[in-house]
Every structure is written in C-alpha cells, then in structure tokens.
Image (tube, grey):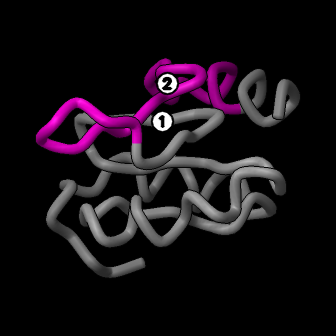
C-alpha cells in the first residue's frame, strides 16, 4: 500500500486519511480502511480488511479493487461522492 500511496501523491492526488475508521451513529467502529478520502467517500482496503467492504458500501462509500490502476483511482477521487459511475 505504501507504493500506491507514493504513486498517488506523486501524481498530485489529495492526501488520504491513513487507518480510517468508519463509525456508526452510536460511535461504534463498523469498518476500517487502510487509505480513505472521506470527502469523496473512497476507501482502499488491504486484503485483511475485505470484511469491511460491505459496511463501507452500505454507507455509500466507493471501494475499488486494490489493484485499480492509479490513473483510474485518481479519476475516481475527482468524482463527487454521490457519483456511482465506478
């Protein structure tokens, strides 16, 4: 994930939150993401975080495959959070 982060930052992508925790309305952690962009609701998961995909998607987050090409991820980061074109 470090190389993905480095590539994103070198390409001018916005800096993500690292180790993001999605909480419900009671303050309970319902999902975690290695990298997240809350403003546009995009999260990248590690293979051990795959169980977090469903709660994130239920909360209307976009969770691309970890092997998404950098150029496609940057395009996703530039789309509004309510865009479902992915």
Q: Does 2 sit above or below residue 29?
A: above
Q: Quadrant of the N terminus?
A: top right
The picture quadrant where one finds residue 81 is: bottom left
Mark 2 and mark 1 lie on one chain; the one further toward the N terminus is 2
Which residue position holds label 2?
Answer: 16
At numbered mark 2, what does the secondary structure look like: helix, strand or loop? loop
Residue 86 horizontal side relative to residue 83, left or right: right
Which residue position holds label 1?
Answer: 36
Q: Is residue 20 magenta?
A: yes
The picture quadrant where one finds residue 72 is: bottom right
Q: Is residue 30 magenta?
A: no
Q: Does 31 sit above or below residue 72?
A: above
Q: Residue at x 41, y 47 (%)?
A: 30
- Disc 2 + disc 1, Cβ < 8 Å: yes
Q: Mark 2 Cα within 10 Å, few/some/many (few <14, many 20+)?
A: some
Residue 86 horizontal side relative to residue 24, left or right: right
Q: Position of residue 18 (x, y in %)?
A: 58, 20
């Amino acid at each position: 994930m470090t190389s993905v982060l480095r590539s994103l930052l070198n390409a001018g992508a916005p800096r993500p939150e690292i180790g993001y925790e999605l909480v419900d309305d009671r303050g309970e952690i319902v999902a975690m993401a290695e990298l997240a962009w809350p403003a546009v609701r995009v999260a990248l998961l590690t293979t051990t975080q795959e169980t977090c995909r469903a709660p994130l998607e239920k909360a209307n987050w976009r969770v691309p495959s970890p092997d998404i090409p950098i150029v496609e991820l940057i395009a996703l980061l530039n789309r509004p959070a309510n865009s479902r074109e992915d």
